[in-house]
Image (cartoon, rainbow, N blue to C red):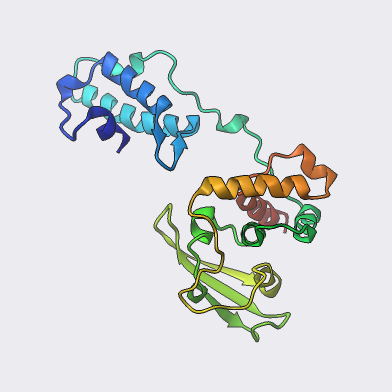
Amino acid sequence: KRLLEFNGSDFVQYRHVTKTYCEDFLAYLRKYSGVTAGVIEESTVLTYYRKFQSAVKEAHKMGLIKEDYSSLVKNPPKDRREEKIKYALTIEEIRAIERTPFFTIDVKNAFLFCCFTGLRLSDVGKLVWEDIQTYSGHTGSLNAIYIMEIKQKKTKKPVIIPFTQQTFNLIGKKRGKDKDLVFNLSKHSGSCARSIRKLMKLVDCPSLERKTITFHTSRHTFATLCVNS
């Protein structure tokens, strides 16, 4: 998509691919600002450019272009993912968040729910009640086990996630109609991000002050809790 937008059409010939073309495409990725997505992260720029680069390298191997022009580009994006600290919440921090009153209750409950299910924001935002079924025990009982069957928006793959009554209680409301959304979240991820930042400022927990918490932290928290258990 980004390459076709940059090119202006879906008609790209090998003769079009030069060092300047590669430099301009990389510059386009770095300055790209989508209508809803905003500026592309450097890690995403790296992913996109590497895919483009692999095609250029293959074209050079096949003798379709004279040089691997993509590798001649100066200051290519660097992989800095390992440099970033990926924070996770402890059970005590989760409890502190749960105790904190917050005006956007669905954002808070969805965040806590994701800490124990590993859902992405894109998936929890479109979760409907028919996706959640009782697997064993009686609904509402302490020993009840639920399963959630969804098709992930990012990977397009179906997953089945089991969870307990305690996790179900984090939804914070009674079961609605099958097609009703479980959480009423904004369709704009930026809105949820701002709400989480506001929530964290209200939580009375000193250890949270040293952490940068985003909605995606809930996913790291889920993974960490699984490993620790």
- For residue 31, what is the image quadrant? top left
Residue 193 in picture, x, y percent from top left: 59, 46
In-image side of 50 versus 188 (left or right): left
What residue is shown at x 19% (from left), y 15% (from top)?
A: 66
Seen from the viewer's position, the closer of residues 125 and 224 is 125
Please give left or right for residue 215 compared with residue 38 in the image: right
Q: Which quadrant would residue 141 be assigned to in this image?
A: bottom right
Q: Quadrant of residue 139?
A: bottom right
The location of residue 88, given as percent across then percent down, is 69, 47
Q: How many marks?
A: 0
Question: Which residue corresponds to the image point at 78% horizontal and 40% vertical from the top-left?
Answer: 209
State the residue in front, 12 or 38: 38
**Of all residues shown, which one is farthest toward the front?**
103
Q: Is residue 39 left or right of residue 94?
A: left
Judged from this view, the residue extending furthest toward the bottom is: 138
Which part of the image, by quadrant, shows the C terminus?
A: bottom right
Q: Residue at x 48, y 76 (%)?
A: 130
